[in-house]
């Protein structure tokens, strides 16, 4: 039976990337019924809403979607669609594999890590008290009464980390590890300083780990993890982190594997999963058939695995890896020089991947 999937082309370079990805996904032989829905700047211009209800309803109905990037215009008053999506669908786990493929220029020899970032809590929960407001003053009064004075001119952000939130993200990391033949989960934290938030994250992580005999567990203090990631990346496998550290380490990981054009992602919740690249809509390249579709295609690989289509996922990943390794039919960002005249376009890259799969 065909998989019914919500397909969101997005805006900027999104539609070109999404089309290239749709073509390679179809070329795996897996059957899809695409439920195409709009999001982003273009539908905002037409309907005054960048994320129409019918798009959200479609994802709720289908439980799985793939999305091209969408622009968040600065100062337009519309909230990031990605933040809305995560909130509306409680997509609490952000999975970002960072794998270095042969043929990509990087200062590292081997990187194959998977970052599992908690998406809903921590300093990104949006609990903030602006400097100079009454609420801020009331909170400071409360803190002073508890022997924790804060300067009058401070802005304050609160960092909630719950047992519930930690439990499910660490379980998601172990489940991912177990399902994908990974050997180890590392929990990253700063429990030595933030005893009641990161300390709780560590304590709950240790408890969850007890249920998984076949996957090793260790923990690292976040600053030490960053140091070791760039000196000995081969020692790491799946890394689970609270929201803020996860955001930063995801970008570190993307840099280690050759850049944003190569970094895929999936946002996963109990009711739905949405797959998308780490990068944005790169609007300056819109309509030029130029940018690299690898990150979205690899997000498609994650989606195939999520749908239980392991064989197709492996074939597609293998074909993408082969095209990158051969290096002749790749986009400008994967060439030794950015103005290399032999670089191919987004759609020709997709042709090369399809050809490779059919070989
Ligand atoms: P960006 O990722 O769109 O682009 C930054 C630069 O990275 C580009 O100019 C380009 O040089 C390079 N790049 C990005 N993707 C590439 C690709 N596939 N191939 C080759 N090179 C690539 O970041 P930005 O310019 O900061 O953001 C543009 C818009 O995208 C903003 O409105 C931002 O809010 C939004 N955004 C959306 C998402 C999403 O939809 N998931 C994620 C991040 C940013």
Image (cartoon, helix red, strand yellow):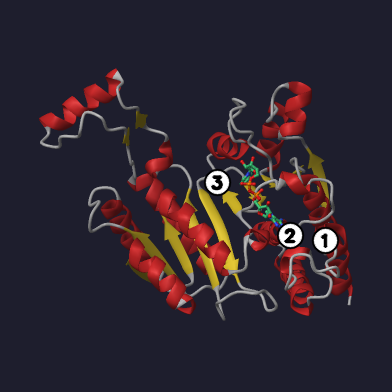
Q: Name the residue under label 2.
A: 297
Give the farthest residue toward the bottom. 109
**Percent position of residue 76, x then y:** 62, 26
- In this rendering, would 136 be left or right of 11? left
Disc 3 to disc 1, how far (Cα)? 26 Å
- In this rendering, would 177 be left or right of 208? right
Q: Name the residue under label 3.
A: 269
**Percent position of residue 161, x then y:** 34, 45
Residue at the (79%, 56%) spot, across then down: 21
Quarter of the C terminus within the rendering: bottom right
Q: Mark 1 points at which residue?
A: 24
Residue at disc 3, secondary structure: loop
Residue 13's disc is: none
Which image quadrant is residue 356 in? bottom right
Residue at the (81%, 56%) spot, across then down: 290
Q: Are marks 2 and 3 in contact (CB under 8 Å)?
A: no
């Amino acid at each position: 039976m065909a998989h019914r999937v919500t397909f969101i082309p997005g805006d900027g370079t999104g539609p070109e990337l999404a089309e290239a990805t749709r073509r390679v996904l179809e070329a795996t032989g897996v059957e899809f019924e695409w439920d195409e829905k709009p999001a982003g700047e273009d539908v905002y211009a037409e309907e005054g809403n960048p994320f129409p209800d019918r798009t959200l309803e479609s994802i709720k109905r289908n439980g799985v979607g793939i999305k091209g990037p969408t622009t968040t215009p600065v100062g337009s008053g519309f909230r990031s669609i990605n933040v809305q999506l995560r909130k509306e669908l409680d997509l609490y786990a952000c999975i970002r594999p960072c794998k270095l493929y042969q043929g990509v220029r990087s200062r590292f020899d081997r990187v194959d890590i998977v970052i599992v970032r908690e998406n809903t809590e921590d300093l990104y929960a949006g609990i903030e008290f602006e400097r100079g407001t009454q609420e801020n003053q009331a909170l400071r009064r409360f803190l002073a009464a508890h022997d924790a004075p804060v300067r009058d001119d401070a802005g304050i952000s609160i960092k909630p980390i719950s047992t519930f939130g930690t439990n499910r993200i660490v379980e998601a990391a172990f489940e991912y590890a177990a399902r994908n033949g990974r050997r180890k989960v590392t929990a990253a934290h700063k429990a030595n300083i933030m005893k009641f938030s990161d300390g709780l994250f560590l304590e709950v992580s240790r408890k969850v780990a007890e249920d998984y005999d076949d996957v090793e567990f260790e923990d690292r203090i976040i600053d030490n993890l960053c140091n070791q990631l760039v000196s000995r990346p081969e020692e790491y496998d799946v890394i689970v982190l609270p929201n803020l550290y996860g955001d930063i380490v995801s970008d570190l990981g993307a840099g280690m594997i050759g850049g944003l054009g190569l970094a895929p992602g999936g946002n996963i919740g109990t009711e739905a999963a949405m797959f998308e690249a780490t990068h944005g809509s790169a609007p300056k390249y819109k309509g030029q058939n130029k940018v690299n579709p690898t990150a979205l295609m690899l997000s498609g690989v994650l989606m195939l695995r999520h749908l239980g289509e392991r064989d197709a996922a492996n074939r597609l990943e293998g074909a993408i890896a082969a095209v990158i390794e051969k290096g002749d039919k790749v986009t400008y960002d994967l060439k030794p020089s950015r103005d290399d005249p032999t670089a191919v376009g987004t759609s020709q890259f997709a042709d090369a991947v399809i050809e490779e799969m059919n070989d």
